[in-house]
Amino acid sequence: MLGLRNSMMVGDRKFVEIPGGRLHELPPLLVRMSASVKRLDRVMEMAEQLVEQEDILPPDPLATPLDFERRRMDLAVNLSEQYLNFVLHWKWGDDVLEWIRQCETTFGTQSDLRNLLRADLWPHAGRSSFVTLLEDKHVDTHGVGIEKAVGMRLTFRQPPPLKCFSDQFLLYLNSSIADTAYHTWAGMSPDSASSLPPERFHFDVVNMSLQ
């Protein structure tokens, strides 16, 4: 695991010092940039059931049955979109954690990076430095928050179906839960403030949704 020793300060940030001056090639980041659920109609059906079960819509004596049905469908569509956004973030988080595992293997096979590895910090501490590297490299996520995505993956081993969620989670709570999960995970490293110098690394980002 990355221990991030021999660091230097640049402004208010601490960066790891890497021997030599060459550019290190990391494995490509293979990401799924689409939620691509198998049954979109089933997602919508579960959203409609959630609206009914949670009794989300307040009664409106002035609303016609058509108005009520329109509001119900709008809310179901909103919940479906929130769920698809959750799935998209989860997939990004899953892909980022897999990329981090591959980067760890790469560090272990290169002599000028191997001295940065600390086996005593296994299994999680220090991995957040690779997340920071993605942010420093300005990876185009098409609106996906990387820290939120990793937090979602840390919270859920697999993305549950929509029927397992409450409307409160989908509309309000998922960001705060993912944020707490990520920062708890990142804080497990005693050197969590250290970063990998982005100018010393190169990697490609491959959209697997286009394959």
Image (cartoon, grey):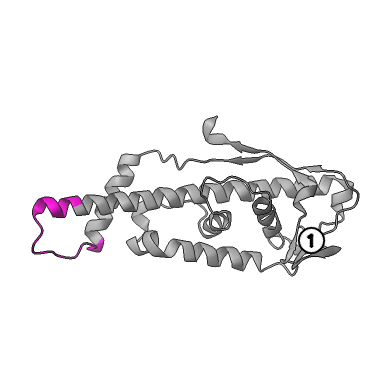
Furthest residue toward front: 11
SS for callout 1: strand
Q: Position of residue 87 (x, y in %)?
A: 46, 49
Residue 161 seen? no
Callout count: 1
138 in magenta: no
Residue at x 26%, y 62% (from the top left corner): 54
Residue at x 38%, y 59% (from the top left corner): 170
Q: Position of residue 184 (x, y in %)?
A: 60, 68
Q: Quadrant of residue 5?
A: bottom right
Residue at x 60%, y 66% (from the top left corner): 183
Q: Is residue 86 above or below residue 186?
A: above
Quadrant (top left, top right, bottom left, bottom right) of the C terminus: top right
Left/right of residue 3 with respect to residue 65 in the rendered view: right
Q: Position of residue 42 (x, y in %)?
A: 31, 43
The magenta region covers: 54-70
Left/right of residue 26 with respect to residue 46 in the rendered view: right
64 in magenta: yes
Residue at x 11%, y 50% (from the top left corner): 66
Furthest residue toward top: 211
Quadrant (top left, top right, bottom left, bottom right) of the N terminus: bottom right
Q: Residues within 10 Å of mark 1 (few under 14, many from 20)?
A: many
Q: Quadrant of residue 195?
A: bottom right
Q: Quadrant of residue 117?
A: bottom right
Q: Is residue 107 above or below residue 57?
A: above
Residue 29 seen? yes
Q: Which residue is mark 1?
A: 15
Left/right of residue 83 with respect to residue 57 in the rendered view: right
Q: Is residue 193 above or below residue 112?
A: below
Left/right of residue 107 with respect to residue 85 in the rendered view: right
Disc 1 marks which amino acid?
Phe
Q: Position of residue 178 (x, y in %)?
A: 51, 62
